[in-house]
Image (cartoon, rainbow, N blue to C red):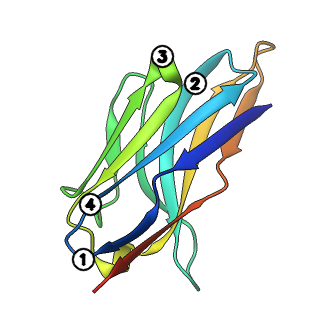
């Protein structure tokens, strides 16, 4: 089993910044992609950003140039630095981790979600 603990959400004014963190622990042999998704009220969950084991990032067009994803492999932690926040960034943000157990099984894990609210 893999546990994900997220932190860093909150309330911020438009134009402000927040940094999210997500630490993975448990039965982990290796971690592949790590990422962030978000879900606004009445909308489907959508990709925000992902980062490969080698550090290659991928961003949705809506956050490109404003958000930066990074990871610390030694700590099994992924970060999301969010700058120039807009009211439309308001959502619950979920961490996602693709990992492998010691038996070789592929595991997809989700965090509990952290609320980000951007006021205008």
Question: What residue is disc 4 on?
Answer: 17
Residue 85: % across, % down: 27, 69
From the image, state whether disc 4 or disc 3 is nearer to you. Answer: 4
Give the mark nearer the N terminus: 4 vs 2: 4
Q: Give the CA separation, mark 3 to mark 1.
A: 33 Å
Q: Secondary structure at mark 3?
A: helix
Residue at mark 3 to residue at mark 2: CA–CA distance: 11 Å
**In the rendered view, would you say 17 is above or below 70?**
below
Q: How much space separates mark 4 and mark 2, taking CA atoms?
A: 28 Å
Query: Percent position (x, y) of residue 49?
Result: 40, 50
Q: In the rendered view, tell whether residue 114 sits above or below residue 6.
A: below
Sooner in the amino-acid sequence: mark 3 or mark 2: 2
Residue identifier under label 1: 14
Identify the image quadrant of residue 57: top left
Contact check, label 1 and label 4, Cβ < 8 Å: no
Q: Using a 10 Å C-alpha cutoff, classify the residue at mark 3 as few (fewer than 14 neighbours), some (14 to 19) or many (20 or more).
A: few
In the rendered image, the vertical position of residue 63 relative to residue 27, given as above or below = below
Residue located beneath label 2 in the image: 31
The residue that label 3 is drawn on is: 74
Q: Residue at x 35, y 76 (%)?
A: 118
The earlier-in-sequence mark between 3 and 1 is 1
Report how far apart the C-alphas of labels 1 and 4 lie in the structure. 9 Å
In front of the other: label 3 or label 2? 3
Which residue is drawn at the image coordinates 51% and 33% (left, top)? 33
Query: Closest to the observer: 33 or 13?
Result: 13
- Badge 2 or badge 1: first in the primary sequence: 1
């Amino acid at each position: 089993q893999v546990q994900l603990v997220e932190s860093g959400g909150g309330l911020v004014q438009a134009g402000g910044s927040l940094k999210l963190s997500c630490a993975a622990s448990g039965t982990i042999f290796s971690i592949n992609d790590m990422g962030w998704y978000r879900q606004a009220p009445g909308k489907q969950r959508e990709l925000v950003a992902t980062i490969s084991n080698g550090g290659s990032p991928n961003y949705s067009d809506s956050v490109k140039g404003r958000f930066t994803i990074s990871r610390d492999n030694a700590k099994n932690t992924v970060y999301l630095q969010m700058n120039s926040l807009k009211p439309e960034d308001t959502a619950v943000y979920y961490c996602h981790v693709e990992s492998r157990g010691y038996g070789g099984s592929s595991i997809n894990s989700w965090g509990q979600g952290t609320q980000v609210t951007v006021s205008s």
